[in-house]
Image: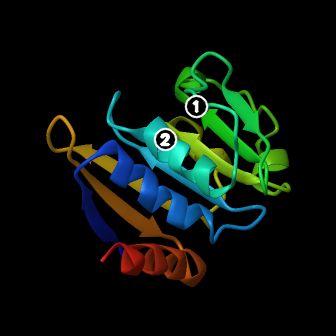
């Protein structure tokens, strides 16, 4: 399995790499975000929102499961944590194969519904401000997006 790692030293750096990724995304793209509570999944999503020119403040969708934001493309920000042990399909296909970008926090709880073609992003806590971000692209399309975003970082 191919993977790329980058370390960010601040929330701003995390948002910047996410913004560079967002600028390359197209309708129907799916990103999953994995990591412990407070590690920066929503911070990463805020960077995606910046890249999509979304003006509304991005917050965690914990109590709504899905939040939708309008920008150059719609952003569907999902938190699947509350769907643990649930067989409920909230119409994932409409999001995953729709006209926007889907970002799913806690994707392990809806594993059976996720498309095979996606960019998996794992965020690890290193210290108060430092994070290790691991990108696992499922195909050459997502591989090119990650390589371009990382290349721009260096």
The quarter of the rendered structure image containing the C terminus is bottom left
Q: Work out how far the residue at label 2 is from the one at label 1, CA to CA, in angstroms.
A: 8 Å
- How packed mark 2 is, by other alpha carbons closer than 10 Å (few <14, some 14-19, many 20 or more), is some
Return the residue found at the far left: 127
**Position of 115 relative to 127 (above/below):** below
136 left or right of 31 in image: left
Q: Nearer the viewer, residue 11 or 31?
A: 11
Q: Which mark sits nearer the N-terminus, 2 or 1?
A: 1
Which dot marks residue 108?
2
Tell me whether circle 2 and circle 1 mark residues in contact (CB < 8 Å). Answer: yes
* Coordinates of residue 133 in the picture (x, y in percent): 32, 56
Residue at the (73%, 27%) spot, across then down: 88
Residue at the (58%, 43%) spot, across then down: 104
The residue indicated by pointer 1 is 80
Q: How is the image coloured?
A: rainbow
Label 1: state its secondary structure.
loop
Q: Nearer the viewer, residue 76 or 151?
A: 151
Q: Nearer the viewer, mark 2 or mark 1?
A: 1
129 left or right of 78 in image: left
* Coordinates of residue 128 in the picture (x, y in percent): 17, 34
* Coordinates of residue 118 in the picture (x, y in percent): 59, 63
């Amino acid at each position: 399995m191919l993977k790329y790692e980058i370390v960010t030293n601040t929330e701003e750096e995390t948002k910047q790499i996410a913004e560079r990724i967002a600028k390359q995304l197209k309708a129907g793209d799916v990103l999953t975000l994995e990591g412990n509570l407070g590690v920066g999944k929503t911070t990463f999503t805020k960077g995606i929102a910046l890249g999509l020119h979304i003006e509304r403040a991005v917050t965690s969708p914990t109590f709504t499961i899905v939040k939708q934001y309008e920008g150059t493309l719609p952003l569907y920000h999902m938190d699947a944590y509350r769907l643990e042990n649930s067989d409920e399909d909230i119409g994932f296909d409409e999001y995953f194969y729709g006209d926007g970008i889907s970002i799913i926090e806690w994707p392990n709880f809806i594993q059976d519904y996720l498309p095979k073609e996606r960019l998996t992003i794992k965020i690890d806590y290193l210290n108060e401000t430092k994070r290790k971000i691991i990108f696992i692209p499922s195909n050459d399309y997502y591989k090119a997006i990650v390589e371009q975003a990382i290349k721009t970082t260096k």
